[in-house]
Image (cartoon, rainbow, N blue to C red):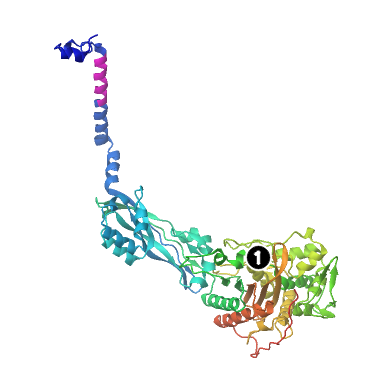
Amino acid sequence: MANPRTAAAKGVPFSASPVLALKLPVWRSRLVLFVLFLAFVSLIGRALYLQGISTEFLQKQGESRYARTLEMPATRGKITDRNGQVLASSVPVKAVWAIPDDVQSASKENLHALATLLAMTDAELNKKLDSDRGFVYLKRQVESDTASQIMKLGIRGVETRKEYKRFYPLGEVMAHVVGFTNVEDVGLDGLEKSSQSSLAGAVGSRRVIKDRLGNIVEDIASIREPRDGQDLTLAIDSKVQYIAFTQLKEAVEKHKAKAGSIIVLDVQTGEVLALANLPSYNPNDRRGLTGAQLRNRAITDTFEPGSTLKPFTVGLSLDTGRVTPNTVFPTAGVMTIGPATIHDSHASTSLSVAQIIEKSSNIGTSKIALQMPAQEMWDMFTTVGFGQQPKIGFPGAVAGRLRPHHSWRPIEQATMSYGHGISVSLLQLARAYLVYARDGDIIPVSFERLNTPPEGRRVVSEKTARQMRAMLETVVSPSGTAPRAQVAGYRVAGKTGTAHKVVGGKYVNQYVASFVGFAPVSQPRIVIAVMVDEPSNGKYYGGEVAAPVFAAVAASALRSMNITPDSAITNIIIPTDGVKESL
């Protein structure tokens, strides 16, 4: 076969080429024409359908060029104290966002000014804009004034969006109760987290028309109106809260302690009037925040309560008729149970039940406990809430440690009677003391303000509760372990606690000092529980470290609440070397 190019070079016509001379079957050309005809018919049919029968698709495509659905943020509900003082509120701010491709045309001067207003370096801004995404946040929660200055720069592709920033007026004073939210306005801690669903509300949306530069030129319709969150009224009294926080802080600093917690409860309703922890943090500025600052120790941490548990062992024995306040027990020397020994920090040949509480005798309490079946003690402890997770709807609340009674050995029953071998949270301990402040019944605690008091659950008889109140009042007398808990003008009652800490399964020479009490004794209105962790400035007994905090808070709180004084005593007598509770 001749080469076509050679043939052309020799003057042979191209038509003489065998390829060009090749004849195809007629049906092939007709098939190609038919396929092209079908394609044109399909296109014409589709065009007629879209433009005449169903225009929805083209309308949607057109709207996508100029219409947008914008989110309409809901305002998060306020959190207030029982008197209406705002503890958390949302203030309007702006989110600054950009379309990176559109910003590329901005001048270096404008980009530098934008970075300055956003408190960024030029490199940080460029890194955000160097994105293949069609949308990036440059900065969230920008103050409105700053956002206005940014928009005045006129940078194409940079826009702002309305959002809210949470503000906490009392800062670190209320941090562990209220908690905080993240940049998306979602609660991360405290009541902000536990009440997220009611506080948050629901976002809305609206359709708008934008021009080619992205500016809104017309509202089309509101698709869904935003639903603002519900306000939350707490049981907290801001004045009592501030008093409790400042007094606790003073004690922690004075005694060079690792941490501390305090709780104030309303005896009549179980409402939490104050709860504070140290260390604390400022929820308005959480830079450099540590785990130690975040911990709501009063609810999430447990400790051995020590002698503050003795009133429940003694109260059970009184209520079952095994002893009376005047029953005498020998307490001389030490008490031996198997290889273990129990001793008191002071020598007494014998003590009545009332004196066992007043002097905080481990030996006396152990002898009372060993008269009773272990199950009765376990029932008493669980009834007042030990070993049970508090039903308060608060994140992180712990149950503590209370082993089943059938595994108790005699030495364990004895030591548990005075608060060793059991762990509780400060909230559990404060609630348990409601039994003696309330004539023998117990009620739930509440962080929200209540309109009606809850129903109580009977724990001991009214007679037993009144007997225990009288005995606990002697604890704060000059001959008791907590004379520093006295309050001028008011009768108060309570119990000290000092316990070694357990580290690595062993007791070490580090202490938890505590005091739980109530006032006024004639008609109790508040229960105050104080815990100071690892005081290291020479004093560590509950009567020396925690009791003065109780006294200072009780004095101010009772007057702030307009509680009528029930004592004519104005001169507080504190012995130079008072009785110390046994460890």
Residue 238 is a magenta residue = no
Residue ID at (41%, 64%) = 165
- As displayed, is residue 154 above or below residue 431? above
The picture quadrant where one finds residue 25 is top left
Residue 135: x, y in percent?
Answer: 35, 51
The quarter of the rendered structure image containing the C terminus is bottom right
- As displayed, is residue 103 above or below residue 383? above
Residue 273: x, y in percent?
Answer: 57, 73
Looking at the image, which is closer to me, 189 or 498?
498
Q: Residue furthest top?
A: 1
Residue ID at (66%, 61%) = 399
Residue ID at (61%, 64%) = 300
Q: Amino acid at mark 1?
A: Thr
What stretch of residues is rendered in magenta? 28-39
The picture quadrant where one finds residue 414 is bottom right
* Observer able to see residue 384: yes
The picture quadrant where one finds residue 571 is bottom right
Question: What is the crowding at mark 1: few (fewer than 14 residues within 10 Å), some, or many (at least 20)?
Answer: some
**With 24 as the anchor, is 384 left or right in this view?**
right
Magenta segment, principal secondary structure? helix
Residue 368: x, y in percent?
Answer: 81, 71
The quarter of the rendered structure image containing the N terminus is top left
- As displayed, is residue 177 above or below residue 252? above
* Observer able to see residue 321: no
Identify the residue under disc 1: 302
Looking at the image, which is closer to me, 201 or 539?
539
Residue 188: x, y in percent?
Answer: 51, 60
The residue tagged with tag 1: helix, strand or loop? loop
